[in-house]
Structures are given as C-alpha cells and as structure tokens.
Image (cartoon, helix red, strand yellow):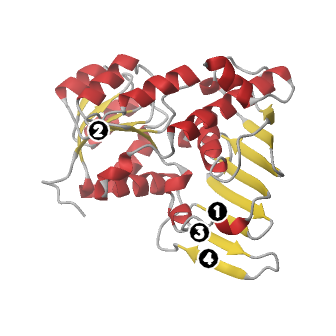
Amino acid sequence: MASKRLAPEVTTWTDALHAPLVADVMNLMGSAVKPIGVGGPPVAEVSDLARNLNCDSFDDLRKMCIDRPAAYLLLTSHQGVTPEDLHVLADQHTVVLTLEPIATDLQGLYAADSLGSSEANGPIVQVPVFSHSPGYLATADPSELLGDKRLVNFISEGRPEHGSLFARLYDAWLTVLGYTLMPEVIDASLVGPLEKAPESLNKLTGGMAIHARMPDSQAALLQVSDNAAITRRILRVQGDIASLRVTDTAYSLHNPDGEALDQSTTDNIPAGFTDMLAHQWRRLLDSPALARPVATPQTRTNAMACCLACLLSIRTGQPESPGKILHMSR
C-alpha cells in the first residue's frame, strides 16, 4: 500500500446521487490516494463530501482542474463536463476514471479516443469494467478451448447509482465481442418507465433484453438494467468444446460431459460495485500501463455501433444492423 506522502493526488467530480458512492470508494482506497478536490453541482451532498474528505469544493470542473491538478480524476457525473474540460485534463496528464462512457455516438468516440492517443496525455478509463474484474482476470483467456460455435449470455444489472443503462450496455458489448463475431442483426426491447425510446443512449433507463445473431453459428443474449434490486454481472459462454461461466469474483470452465477443466474463486475479494471500482483503481496504481483502453479501437467502435443498433431497434421495433450504422458513419 502506498504511503500517504507518496500517494497520488486525486480529485472527483460527482453529484447528489453518486456522492455516497465516492465516499465509499475513497474509504476503500484509504491511504493509497490523496483527495485534494471535490467538484459538482452546488448541492449539500457534494459540499458534505468535500468537507468529509477535507477538500475544497468546486462547482466548475475546469477551475478545479486548474487550481487542483491531479494524477487522477474520478468522474461519476457528466453534468457540467465539456469536451474542453477533457482536453485540459489530457494536457495535464490526468487519468480520468469515468463511471459513464465519455461518448454517446461514434463521432464522439473517435474524438475521445484522440485525447488518449499520445503517451503524453492522460487516458480516459471506464470503471469498473467487467474485463478488469478479479473473476475475469483469472480466466487466463480460455477462448481457444471453447470452440467456434458459441452461445454467449451476459447479464449486467445494478442499482441506479451504480452506473447508467448505457454504461452497462457498452460494457456488455465490450465483453460479448471478446467471444463472438460482429452481429449481423440485433433485436432489442426496453422495459421500464420510458414511454418511448429516447434520442440518445445516455437517456436510456429501465431494463433491456437483446438478441444478437452472428455469422458462423454464433448468437448472444444480453440482459442489462439500471434499476435492479442488486448489482451483479454474469458471463456464460456455451461452446461446442467447453462452457465458461464468469462472475466478478469467480470463473469455471467445463467440458461437454460436465467435467471441470479449470476454476477459480477469489473469496478474499468482496463482490460489491465499489469493491470492483476500487480493485480496478488499485491495479492502475500498481501498474500504470493498465490505464490503456480496455479494448482495441476497433472493438470499442464495434461495441458503440452495437449500442446504437440496440437503440435504433427499440425505436423501430425491428432488428437492426450495427454494420450498416458503421458504414453510414464513415
């Protein structure tokens, strides 16, 4: 554990909903980080957080960045955040840990990727992504053992303060595309408080059921929600040679006869949402090179196209092609 004197300085930008989450994360991080600034809308929850962390409070992100330059910014709210603010952070080499995807469309994704294209700039890292969870990291990439014919099922559901529906959807597609080819068509349904599908991905809320058809006898079923009673993520991959099951803290690999080929359980690591966020952050502190994007640019582009196809499918009531969305964006 890093000492208080050597701990990297961090700031946070949050809101009333996420201020308790930030407090929990900072408590878990302990002396590994040194909070020096708290910002957000001028509400009591943000002011109380700043006082409890013994930090100055800001209601302007750019002013906080200039007055309190830090190694890390924990971004749990995008309210009041502009592209210019992100450029200031990049120029200061600040690593941005964001609960939500920075971009909501392909053009925004290309622009966000360009911020971290230079090694001199601080990258933008979404947290906590499933591919950095202890359970997933323990799998040692069993992809070649599964066979080519695959049925992939991914469940990601959680409390509203534990990430938006869009954040869970994007993380889900980043995960699924690690085990399947790009979908030919996607059919999605939205259940929840919205009377009609919104115009933007970051306005989605409720629960979403998704069926994706891929070439070469592959398919995927996704279930994502931002208003569930509990927060959890589960990946299942049924291949023609083996079957894989992964949670945030455990995994198992079985052959078609049910014999266990490999398995691991990290019982010593709590499985809560804030635990997963703190776990990913600690890994970045131990190995700064891990601040690189969690997937290749092509995978991130494909994942965003799949998210947009889900949104379009909800609006049209028909299966939609992410490939056509990619073609139209060029």
Q: CA distance from mark 3 to mark 1?
A: 16 Å
Element under disc 3: strand
Q: Is residue 170 above or below residue 108?
A: below
- Pointer 3 local density, CA inside 10 Å: few below 14, some 14–19, many at least 20: many
* Location of mark 4 (residue): 263
At 39% across and 25% down in the image, what residue appears?
Answer: 43
Residue 205 can be seen, yes or no: no
Q: Is residue 214 above or below residue 276?
A: above
At 52% across and 48% down in the image, what residue appears?
Answer: 129
Q: CA distance from mark 4 to mark 2?
A: 37 Å
Element under disc 1: helix
Mark found first going from the N terminus, 3 or 1: 1
- Pointer 2 local density, CA inside 10 Å: few below 14, some 14–19, many at least 20: few
Percent of width and height locating residue 144: 65, 65
In front of the other: label 4 or label 1? Answer: 1
Look at label 2 and name its amino acid: Glu
- Pointer 4 local density, CA inside 10 Å: few below 14, some 14–19, many at least 20: some
Look at label 4 and name its amino acid: Gln
What label sits on residue 119 in the rendered view? 2
Q: Is residue 271 above or below residue 230?
A: below
* Location of mark 1 (residue): 143
* Location of mark 3 (residue): 250
Task: From the viewer's perspective, tell me whether residue 145 is left or right of residue 296.
Answer: right
Q: As rendered, which of 128 and 64 lies closer to the eye?
A: 128
Look at label 1 and name its amino acid: Ser
Q: Quadrant of residue 50?
A: top left
Look at label 3 and name its amino acid: Ala
Element under disc 2: loop
- Pointer 1 local density, CA inside 10 Å: few below 14, some 14–19, many at least 20: some
At 20% across and 32% down in the image, what residue appears?
Answer: 69
Confirm or deny contact between disc 3 and disc 1 (CB under 8 A): no
